Image (cartoon, rainbow, N blue to C red):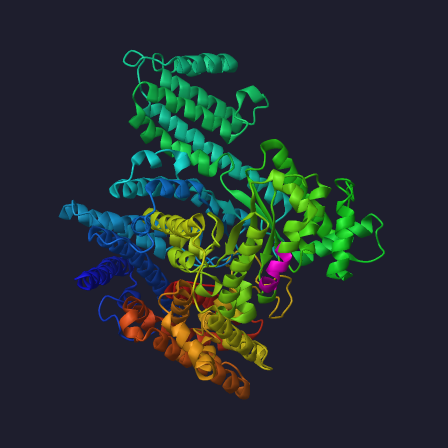
Amino acid sequence: MVNDMKKDVNAQGTNKVSADLYFVMECFQHVLQNLGEDEIAKALPWLCDENAPVELSNDPCILNKQIQAFSIAFQILNLVEENAAVQHRRQVTDSEKAIRGSWEETFRGWQKQGIEPQQMAELISSLNICPVLTAHPTEAKRITVLEIHRELYLLLVKNENTMWSNLEREAIRREVQALLERWWRTGNVNLEKPQISDERDNVMHYFSHAFPLALQMSDQHLQNVWRNMGFDPKLLCRAEHYPRLHFGSWVGGDRDGHPYVSADVTASTLRKHRQAALTILRDKLVDLAKRLSFSALRNEMPQSLQDFITQRSEIHGDAGQKALKRNPKEPWRQFVNLMILRLQNTLDENDNNDLVYLSSQALQEDLQLLRSTLAEVGAQKVADHLLFPIERQVQCFGFHLAKLDIRQNSSYHEKALDQLLKFCGETQQHYSEMNEEQRIEFLNNELSKNRPFTLQGSKCGKEADELLAYYWEVKKYTELYGYDGVGSFIVSMTRGVSDLLVVYLFLREVGLLHSPIRVVPLLETIEDLQAGEKILQAFFTHPLTQERRKYQDGFYEVMLGYSDSNKDGGILASRWNIYQTEKKLSAVAAKHDVKLCFFHGRGGTISRGGGKYHRFLDSMPAGSVSGHIKLTVQGETIAEQFSNPMSSIYNLEMLQAGVARQAMKSYLGKTHEDYPTAAMNKLASLAFTHYPQLVNHDHFIEFYSNATPIDVIEHSKIGSRPARRTGKRSLGDLRAIPWVFSWNQARFNLTGWFSVGNALQQLQTESPDEYKQLKEVSESWPFLFYTLIQVETNLLNADDKVMQMFANLVGNKDAQTALMDVLLYDYKEALKQITHMFDAPVSERRTRQLENIARRGPILVALHELQVKKLQEWRAQSQSKEAEKLLKDLLQLTNAISGGLKNTG
């Protein structure tokens, strides 16, 4: 019965996609016909036979328009599928079946374990979750186009309402047509690289608009589920009872290989965050004043309310009296008017401390007082309804909006320190030339002193001057506004504890050593992940780290890199080493009686750690989630997850409930797991050993450079950051995003599967017992299940025929054959082995995935054929004007194909 219901819901979802897609594409066809683009209109997909082959025009002008039309069509399909997914979840809920990973499923599971609502509430209130938005260059769509997406999504939702008459439905159709015409007339591709200010404005849209709305709706949903479970509403009625959801940003603070993130950019970003946070709160208070129309003639005024109004109005003088006169006999409005006045003074940077809020905590105190006065006259429900969203806004966004992390590479720090030491006459040996033991000895000796190396403003060298400039800007900000807006100082490519102690030295230089600022290692490569235990052990026991504990909240942060570890050793070795590192570092933290906050550096694609939140969190080792967690939301993933309110609510629920489930294991001490880790260790080792056969092959660079459009991607205008860290033409210097992006564009997708097939086959042959152990837990061990499913998704999205088309671009046929033999063997073996692991063909297990691929297939194949042809022509043209035109065509194709694949890198 349940399976029949599930099939019925799935069928409804498929039908909805088809119906909505036909509606929008028919509108698009109408628009093109009205514009005289009949040939383009005829070529639009999904209006007749979805699987019909696609024919592209030989006329360059028409062809260009066809590519644009297909690009828009793919984006329409993605929006239609997103909306259908929302409706699917509603239907599942209506069928009284909990959505996987949801609060309802979580609460039911806890009930079965005998966990009391009081324990649940305590756990929920202890959660501290921080999504960190980054401008990693994976968002291929212009901000203007993203705004059109939001409008179209809302029109799709509007069209679902059954209340409309035929005339009203026709009006909605005309709205859709007008929007599609705007879209058609808008360029889809960035003609210039976006500025950091553009990227900052984009993420600030989410902090200022999308997240506050999503937070309010998500909180309401959690409260509704709690009540429906029959739990005591009083356990979950105040802001402090809810998960502490905070937000972070790297835009304006991440300078690892990003030369345009200057000290001025960091300073202006910190201030813009603050101004936006204060403006949002002021506007919310203005709205509150409009609603809080209680009359003193109908409600007895509490003495605490009268005292506040008298005292605050006197402090504010004439302005305070004006605030009172606006609403005579309405004391609660007068109270809020005085809060607005004080907050406006804060926004205006008034230098009289008595007239401003010095911190968000002071505003919270006023809100608490306001709540108590409403409760005193029996208006508790009004207080809950009107004040709770503002209290949560203050709790989650404060006066800082989002914490700005500062990230820099360890090698950059070495150069800066060399320059500082040379400036102050310490020239016996370059710091960068010391071994780890010598570095630690030098740093310990230097950190025992209180002296700075330089005076502010000294010119020591490019790297040193740039580094100290942004450290001084952070210092200036903290002196004015405190530390709430400042995130962590993250060291990319942390190789040893000296890389962290160097940051202590720089903090000392500007007077920030004895502060709450966290110094965070980023463990990126396989080697660094494996060294993580030793690094953390040395860091935790260092005297300065011990001393700095009194300035912090008892949590230490460690960032784990999914992208570079994948590029370094393949997906299986990457995931297993991260899993093992989480276990080992959690044990080190427990040994030293500290708690860890893991910061997961996830990208959007599977190869870079992407995937559904609940699956991702459930796959972590038990005991590794303390309740405090950070994770990046990068590039295109931001819009995918948080552009539309219902998707935002779903993703916030999956994130919070997923963290809660894992944290409950730690809370109850249930951290023992009985899985075949030795067998998994051997499988990962086999994969790691096999991986270099590809990347270390004599002809690999030649193959990669020709069989993927990496040269086109390096010319793209996606993101403000360069594709390479230092500009060197080497695989090591190439960033993980273009690495993944280029393989995906050529439909190899090998960053998400290579070496898995060979490793499984080898384990099956050499260690059949261990292979059997893994097969037996392939669906019950969340880590293994999640990993295999993600690998299989990448395999399904790959296309061996398109791979061969791109491989044919490699001039050296021996190299082409040798590498394609290696790749195709592993590709086919991985598909076979995963099917064997799950004991069921993919056609039975992944029907929706296969439908999605089939729907996009014919258009993608046609675009890939054109892409290969134009790539060949462009490479042959060199620097001619024709080459410039071909490059524009290739960038447009890249954009269209990215839409069809639903990802970049």
Range of magenta residues: 528-536
Query: Is residue 535 one of those drawn in magenta?
Result: yes
Q: Residue 200 location in percent, x, y?
A: 51, 46
The image quadrant of residue 211 is: top left
- Most common SS among magenta residues: helix
Count every numbered label the image shows and give the total. 0
Q: Residue 348 location in percent, x, y?
A: 53, 27
Q: Residue 162 location in percent, x, y?
A: 16, 47
Q: Is residue 80 left or right of residue 189?
A: left
Identity of the residue furthest to the left in this view: 166
Q: Nearer the viewer, residue 639 or 26?
A: 639
Quadrant for the N terminus, please. bottom left
Q: Is residue 26 left or right of residue 276?
A: left
Asked if residue 713 shows in the view, the reply is: no
Asked if residue 698 shows in the view, the reply is: yes
Q: Nearer the viewer, residue 315 or 598?
A: 598
Q: Nearer the viewer, residue 716 or 447?
A: 447
Q: Nearer the viewer, residue 740 or 445?
A: 445
Q: Residue 364 location in percent, x, y?
A: 46, 28
Q: Which residue sits at x=52%, y=24%?
A: 345
Q: Is residue 688 above or below residue 322?
A: below
Q: Which residue sits at x=83%, y=51%?
A: 426
Identity of the residue furthest to the bottom in this view: 814
Query: Is residue 841 one of those drawn in magenta?
Result: no
Q: Is residue 382 above or below residue 790?
A: above
